[in-house]
Amino acid sequence: MSFFSDPIPYFDKWLEQGPALVETPDGQTSWMIARYDDVVQALSHPGLSSAFMPGGMLNHTDPPEHTRQRKPIARAFSTRRVEALRPRIQQITDELLDTWETEEEVDVIGTFAYPLPIAVICELLGVPAQDRNLVRTLSSELIAPETMVDAYGRFAVYVQNLLDTKEPGDDVITELRDEPNLVANLVLLITAGHETTVQLIGNGLLALLRDPAMKRRLIDDPILIPDAVEELLRFDGPFPTGLIRVATSDVVIGGVTIPKSSQVMISLGAANRDPSRFADPDVLQLGRNAHVAFGHGIHYCVGARLARIEGEIAFRTLLRRFPELALAAEPEWRESFIRGLASFRVRPKP
């Protein structure tokens, strides 16, 4: 079984050995950081640089450049702004799930998990509705190893054309129009702004369908759903291998010295299954300690609050409207840097 369909054996190996030089699932040789405490330390370590790729994209910068770029983006994704989106997110959710009412079987990914967050991020940023299918295609290709480079070039051309032709409006693109590296950062915001939420909904719903007791508990007591979203992010989050860094000096993590110039991979997925942090990590359990599905430190996901709101509304509405929702076929995992399902068919009603 491949890493993409079942990463747990890899996590177990990485957690057992601690920081070590390994062959990663994509065939590279890299230092792997997997234990929870080591991951938190690594994500805050000044000797591990994010600036290993050209282009100046926010997630590939270090302070002070990172601080300068992040401030206006974080302001654009303020708590007040994303909280104000709740009614619209609910409306989109209801409209998408209306189409399930007359169907015997549906694909969760194609009919709900993708359309919901892509509609939200496009409206928030100011991407035209007619471009959503193109944006979805470009984003999917951007996170696939074999198409990543070509997709980035085409995505950047699309974004630049959008900036050249778009009329000002009440949206994030207009607000950030004069910021540096805007093309690269809009590619990042569009992609990360929906892809991770797609997987939260898809992976999370699959986990609930495979745990009927937890599913029933949330149906009976929906006030628990925000807590469940946190646990679903921990249990099967979108970043199994996680984040790449480069050591700018010899760095000690978990008592192991990582030599200068080494590539370092930080596995958020493994950290979230570390039994020293989470008892019975392969079991869904509410009330856990804080996870690292959104990262940690200065690169903590700027859209985390938006993803949580979308997840809460999606699961609450799904479970309320379709309490008998059941798997129709064994789901298929895609091969991607972001862990998610290619196909996930369910029966909305008995």
Image (spheres, rainbow, N blue to C red):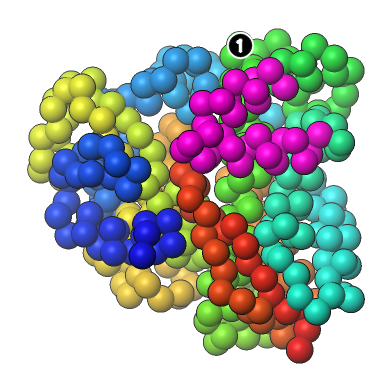
| Res 14 quadrant in image | bottom left
Q: On the rendered structure, is 20 left or right of 42?
A: left
Residue at 62% x, 51% y is 197
Give the residue at mark 1: 180
Q: On the rendered structure, is 339 left or right of 98?
A: left
Q: On the rendered structure, is 267 left or right of 257?
A: right
Q: Main secondary structure of the magenta part?
A: helix
Q: Is residue 59 above or below residue 143?
A: above
| Res 265 quadrant in image | top left
Q: Examine the structure image and report whether residue 348 is included in the region drawn in magenta.
A: no
Give the percent coordinates (x, y) of residue 263: 26, 30
Judge by depth and name the residue closer to the eye, 303 or 15: 15
Judge by depth and name the residue closer to the eye, 207 or 350: 350
| Res 329 quadrant in image | bottom right
Give the percent coordinates (x, y) of residue 121: 73, 40
Q: On the rendered structure, is 137 left or right of 4?
A: right
Q: Which residues are magenta?
A: 131-158
Q: Is residue 226 visible?
A: no
Give the percent coordinates (x, y) of residue 48: 28, 28
Q: Residues within 10 Å of mark 1 (few under 14, many from 20)?
A: few
Residue at 73% x, 79% y is 347
Disc 1, SS = loop
**Extreme residue toward the front, this view:** 146
